[in-house]
Amino acid sequence: MVYGTRDMFNRRIRMEGRKIDIFAEVNEIKKHIGEILPELDGDRLIIMMSHCRQYYEGHLHYGRRGIPENQQKKRDLTEAENILYELLLKLKLNPSTSYRWFLATRIPQDIK
C-alpha cells in the first residue's frame, strides 16, 4: 500500500469513541428528521441544514457574536428550520458538522 492513499478512502467518523461509517450516521439522522419533518427531500434538507449552520455559528461560536457585521447579517430561522435546529441539538449533533456530513454523502441524480 502506498503511504497517503489510506486517508483518501477513509469514510469513517468517530462518534463516542468508536469509528462508524459516515453514510450510516447520515441515514440515521435522516431517519430522525423524517419522523418529525416527513415532507423534506434531499436538496431542501441540505438548504435548511445550511441555514441552521449559519444560525449556530452566528450565535454560539466564540468570537463571532460581537462583530458588528455579523450582527447586521443575522437572520431568524423559519418554523421548520427551528424544529430541525432543535432536533440536531437534542441529538447532541453540531449543526456545522452535520451539514458537512450531508454534503459529503450527497450523490448526483444520474448515479442513483
Image (cartoon, rainbow, N blue to C red):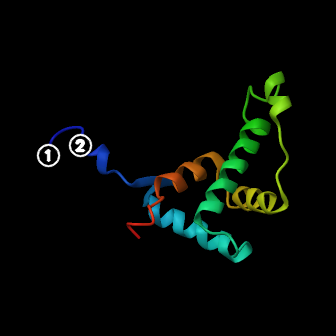
Residue 85, percent across and down?
75, 56
| 109 or 65: nearer the viewer | 109
Q: Nearer the viewer, residue 78 or 97?
A: 78
| Residue found at the very far front of the displayed protein | 110
Residue at image point 82% right, 51% down: 77
**Mark 2 closeness class: few <14, some 14–19, many ≥20 residues within 10 Å:** few
Image: 7 above or below 63: below
The answer to which quarter of the image holds residue 71 is: top right
**Image quadrant containing the C terminus:** bottom left
Q: CA distance from mark 1 to mark 2?
A: 8 Å
Residue 61 in which image quadrant: top right
What amino acid does circle 1 point to?
Met
Q: Secondary structure at mark 2?
A: loop
Across and down, in percent, residue 24 comes to 47, 66
Question: Residue 1 shows which numbered tag?
Answer: 1
Instruction: Give the left or right position of residue 42, taking residue 91 as reference.
Output: left
The dot on residue 5 is: 2
